[in-house]
Image (tube, rainbow, N blue to C red):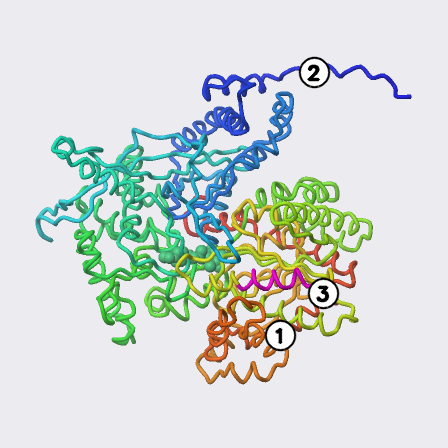
Amino acid sequence: TEPEIAPAPAPARSPLADRIVDTLIHRIGKDERAARKHDWLAATILTLRDEIIDKWMASTRQAHAAGAKRVYYLSLEFLIGRLLRDALSNLGRNAEVGDALAVLGVDLAEIEEIEPDAALGNGGLGRLAACFMESMATLDLPAYGYGIRYVNGMFRQRIDDGWQVELPETWLAHGNPWEFERRESAYFVGFGGEVIGNEVGHVHWKPAEAVEALAYDTPVVGWRGKRVNTLRLWSARAFDPIRLDAFNAGDHIGALAGQVRAESLVRVLYPSDSSAAGQELRLRQEYFFSSASIQDIVRRHVQYFGDIRTLPDKAAIQLNDTHPAVSVAELMRLLIDHHDLPFDEAWEITRKTFGYTNHTLLPEALESWPLPLFERLLPRHMQLIYAINGRVLREARKSDGMSDQAVAAISLIDENGERRVRMANLAFVGSHSVNGVAALHTALMKQTVFADLHRLYPARINNKTNGITPRRWLMDCNPGLTALVRDAIGAEFCDDTAKLQSLDSFSNDPSFRERFSGVKRSNKVGLSNFIGESMGLRLDPDALFDVQIKRVHEYKRQLLNIIETVALYDQIRSHPEEDWTPRVKIFAGKAASSYHNAKLIIKLANDVAKRVNSDPSVGGLLKVAFLPNYNVSLAERIIPAADLSEQISTAGMEASGTGNMKFALNGALTIGTLDGANIEIKEHVGDDNIVIFGLTADEVAAKRAGSYRPREVIEGSRELSQAVNAIASGVFSPDDPSRYRELMNGLYDHDWFMVAADFDAYTAAQRAVDARWADQAGWQAAAIRNVARVGWFSSDRTIGEYAREIWGVM
Ligand code: 26W
């Protein structure tokens, strides 16, 4: 018989639970019974925010009292994701808040799940900015992030019949409880008009139109809540929200035109990474946020320190790619036109204040603006850019051995064809430091795009290899692995990921390997359940989970992976008797809405998935899943469950990559090319714990310069030609057999991304992966060594280097 158990007394409500309920009632206006999940989420965030505010103010006061130098990170993108879990764990309040909510009948994990992602970025560059913000707070640096408060961030991706469909993402639909509107911090930002006065006398820019930039602040909590910094995002409004004269005259729409124009500035994030938009609205966005940010920085400096000439001692401004590069001209304008400094002095201050980070060498991503457009929108800045250019070109001509061609390459104005303003050159000459984001990328910067500028300013280019925050990308997203590591080596690694090194010897401990693979398996079960529920696809958690998740771009070569998948499918079907490794191929990623081939590659992945998943003859040996709407939260779910990390870009084209670091930290093995940070990951984990294949960057360059004939390569490889021909002839697209003909013809005719050239090496590498997988002890040992050896790729290390070597703040 069942023993009789008295019902447990209801646990007493903690003061924290009372505060959450109080917030719910007084700030949300609901009682406990009427509250829905979103109300609990908002009440929890607001309660937590109230507590953060004290630390926030203390951080500001401390920087002020110390007269500290501040860091300003200017970025058009911050790909933050959800904030609640991150903030709770950095404050060490997870359990306490979870318990308080449980007493109220609310599941913390459930409300964390409904927080919308702040997706104010495209991909790597925006996510890096978010990791950097967290690390700057963790390292106790007084720092501000500046960006745009887009109403619509990165689009939501739906897959309709295999095709990507873009939908607007409304992350602000339920309000944003994290942010503070700062009505007092508003700035005038002008556009167009004319410049009055001349070079000698006092110059004055009279803009034809203007908007007001309005600040919204979000607190950024560092690890252990040591410091809270500010992410300041600008919104825009018209000076006169409504023109009453027009309204009264019956023009009800025209009366609101100013407001609509202003709002259009912050309406939407440009969803293309790696190809410059070139539209007027984009330049307006760039100037709008640059001007507001620089005005804010200058105002704060003058208010705290009195003398604008000490700016470089008290402010370091980092330009996240060239998107904020017009800031160089904006600071010059403020120094000269508003603070009456002579040009030379203004130029020295400017260069000492700015640093510039380059994130890509792709020519189509290098921003340049048609001169007439730039001049019409920013006439005063155009003058200043001419003046800067005059100085730089004089220096170049004086320097030994500069050819006319080199001088032309250095010029801020591109004179080939339609004249254009080169933003990378402006950022380069306007900064004392120019950095790349991985060793190879930095070396290539010196050899290619910036070769001549590098010759003129040889001390300027430096490397800062990217990193990721271990809080979000290990401790928060993979609690199972975190607990296991803590049991093995203690908790020190939580404050210093270099300490993960002590895990290394555990790779030889069979019982630890057992527990380690148990954690991975339970993460895989979790992901399998998610995929089962969300897309109705059943996966075997014991199969090898082979994952490629990132923006879809030809240089990242999802196509190489898909073609190899097709070849494998073919092999399994024709040799069912062989001992194949069960694999799940997982893809996710968005394509820029105007990028035809990238969207076609998404469709191909889905077409292949459809065919393979419904083919009983491959049994459970191969499954393909394309997960829709890749974002930060989905990455946090997938990465802890990955066995194999696909980092297979054409060598020389991926500046760094940061997903590669996240996977390794979570115990996946990398299959990758010698590109970006893969090279440094290989140096850290050791050649035996990574699978490298394919052409090197030098070999790619040589092939492109020489006589590479992809057709011969394809025809010379039976597996490759069979796979390519199957795709081209419509095996995977019976409803439209010619769908992929052009895409495949591109491989035969030019194959810019070396898919054919690397195919055999890639296939061989994948079969080597199969063999390694068969030796589970060896696999787990290598995975453990990855975790133990990639602590160096923490963004704390990266930010430490920026702080010491570029910003002078540590
Ligand atoms: C102007 C259009 C545009 C928009 C975004 C051009 C270029 C970009 C970014 C530079 C693209 C980007 O995100 N680059 C990625 O930056 C990461 C962080 O440094 C690197 O890890 C990736 O390799 C790089 O592709």
For the residues labelled 1 and 3, the Cα–Cα distance comes to 24 Å
Q: Which residue is mark 1?
A: 761
Of 340 and 192, nearer the camera is: 192
Give the total number of marks visible in the rendering: 3
298 inside magenta stretch: no
605 inside magenta stretch: yes
Marks 1/2 in contact by CB < 8 Å: the verdict is: no
Mark closer to the chain start, 1 or 2: 2
Q: Quadrant of residue 543?
A: bottom right
Query: Does residue 434 appear anywhere in the picture?
Result: no
Name the residue located 46 percent from the left edge and 22 percent from the top edge. 28
Residue 719: x percent and y percent? 63, 77
Rendered view: 800 above or below 387: above
- Give the foreground label among 2 and 3: 3
Q: Amino acid at mark 2?
A: Ala
Q: State the extent of the magenta-drawn residues as a range.
A: 604-616
Disc number placed over residue 618 in the picture, else none: 3
